[in-house]
Image: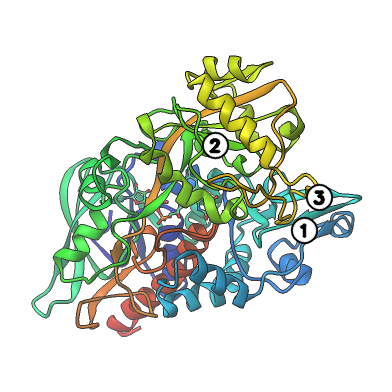
Amino acid sequence: MASHYDVIVVGAGNAALSAAIAAKENTDSVLVVEKAPEYFRGGNTYFTGGIIRFAFEGLDDIRTVIPDMSETEVNQVEVGSYTESQFYDDMMRVTEGLADPELAQILVSQSLPTMQWLQSKGVRFVLAYGRQAFKDGDKYRFWGGLLVEAVGAGKGLSDQQFDVCAEMGIDVRYSTQATKLIQNQKGRVSGLTVLGPDGFEDISAGAVVLAAGGFEANAEMRCRYLGPGWENVKVRGIPYNTGDGIKMALDVGAQSHGHYSSCHAVAWDMNAPAFGDRNITELFQKHSYPFGLIVNINGERFLDEGEDFRNYTYVKFGRAYLTQPQGLGFHIFDEKVKHLLRDEYHIDQVTMARADTLEELAERLDIDPAGFVKTIEEYNAAVQTDIPYNPAIKDGRNTVGITPPKSNWAETIDTPPYTGYAVTCGISFTFGGIKIDTRGRVVTNSQEPVPGLYAAGEMVGGLFYHNYPGGSGLSAGMVFGKLSGTSAGQEAKALKGG
Ligand SMILES: Cc1cc2nc3c(=O)[nH]c(=O)nc-3n(C[C@H](O)[C@H](O)[C@H](O)COP(=O)(O)OP(=O)(O)OC[C@H]3O[C@@H](n4cnc5c(N)ncnc54)[C@H](O)[C@@H]3O)c2cc1C
């Protein structure tokens, strides 16, 4: 194996592989070092549903990303549009105006071109019928500005990106952990120390791109930054994202940036393992709560299940379970809405109970029966049944006179059998990281770039605060991966006089 590369990329998730592909387009030799063994490759990206948010004006744009759509398919879908300004507004709305405007602008303006670029490299996408569409007459109507997923979901995205890397001649070393950035006498990052199967090794490089994920799999850092209680949550993905990239960058003077005390977390099966399961992947999540109710073990509601489309609430609601007794919540549905439940409610490994009466359901789930029945009765009486129910839009069918209210999709719970699903908080990724500029360069507190150092993906801070528009983790990884990889490749090439 060579001991010098033009560009070394740290990590092998979506951001890293996008960076590696872009770097290889711009220079000659690129190495990817990945801490996980090959059989565990793909980072958190592997665990995703592979659904990706990007701006588009209409079906013509979608067809540039999915050129193999048949005419029959084209005629049976209503995709609407999701403009750059809508994407930008969503970013600002859900992050309470805190998203870095420059990074958010790059994300929204480059989201479609980056999807088109990956498509041109051979990555295939499809419409996400199962999760983002409702059948309305003879049309599938897509909602929420989020409608495309990678073929084969996260695993498919990851495998396809590895295939592109292999075709382009990008080297990948597995079971190889980056441990330290090497700087020359001028302060330029000139390589990397890695710990691989044969021990420590120094590899020199023209530029290094860090894309090693956040710190969600590091209990000590979770507790330190997110707060007490977070050391006990379940991790939805890989055990390898322990903040290494962030720490290495901080060690050479990078500016720490973003919402360190916040993260992406969701409702996750109470009995899911401590870290992600490669076979179940994201299916321990539970995202259909807008069509039912959420109660705690006392049978009390604690949030507005219908506040907004699921895409805009599932992340901030994930952490709400931690505030409840035993860190638990229960998603409750009746027979009327059963057909609206997402696939994840139907897997064999689900922690659920079914019963013909509310009391019996509460007993089976270890919820206080009296509290539970009282909550449901008060809720049923508060539902404004004269407002039409429509799961495809924010229908305004709400409750009146109860706290918290349910603002949309309020439907009485009165038709047995009743089902309940036990969930807790599962962390996906952290929001705090290091600062990059508009070329993907890592910058110091004085806004000066650290020469030779770039970053992308979860470990970049400043994009997500408090909350996150679903599907933008992958688009951010692709956009900033491509950006940093392109810049790193060009810099490395220029350095050697190419
Ligand atoms: C279950 C789940 C479902 C999700 N679903 C979606 C979705 O549908 N759409 C969406 O947009 N987002 C989704 N997300 C978020 C998404 O996973 C992330 O935004 C995205 O995958 C992050 O990509 P990344 O490349 O930054 O990190 P990762 O894909 O996690 O890659 C980081 C890589 O760095 C490696 N690494 C860490 N430390 C080192 C080191 N010292 N040396 C070498 N390598 C190292 C890791 O092993 C890993 O392979 C989901 C997350 C989870 C957990």
Q: Nearer the viewer, mark 3 or mark 1?
A: 3
Residue marked by disc 1: 68
Tell whether 10 sits left or right of 151.
left
Q: Classify mark 3: helix, strand or loop.
A: loop
Residue closer to the observer: 191 or 313:
313
> Is residue 41 in view from this perspective?
no
**Amino acid type shown at disc 3:** Pro
Residue marked by disc 3: 388
Q: Nearer the viewer, mark 1 or mark 2?
A: 2
Report the Cα–Cα distance between label 2 and label 3.
22 Å
Question: Which percent across, then down, holds residue 191?
Answer: 20, 65
**Amino acid type shown at disc 1:** Asp
First of labels 2, 3 by sequence position: 2
Question: Which percent across, then down, holds residue 37?
Answer: 34, 39
The image shows residue 161, relative to residue 421, as above or below, that is: below
**Amino acid type shown at disc 2:** Ile
| Residue at 43%, 60% in the rendered image | 15
Residue closer to the observer: 5 or 486:
486
Q: Quadrant of residue 411?
A: top right
Question: Which percent across, then down, holds residue 408?
Answer: 67, 51
Label 1 close to label 2 by CB (< 8 Å): no
The image shows residue 283, relative to residue 256, as above or below, that is: above
| Residue at 40%, 28% in the rendered image | 273
| Residue at 70%, 43% in the rendered image | 383
> Is residue 145 in view from this perspective?
yes
How many dots with numbers? 3
In the orientation shown, which residue stands out farthest toward the left?
185
Tell whether 494 sits left or right of 140.
left
Label annotation for residue 294 = 2
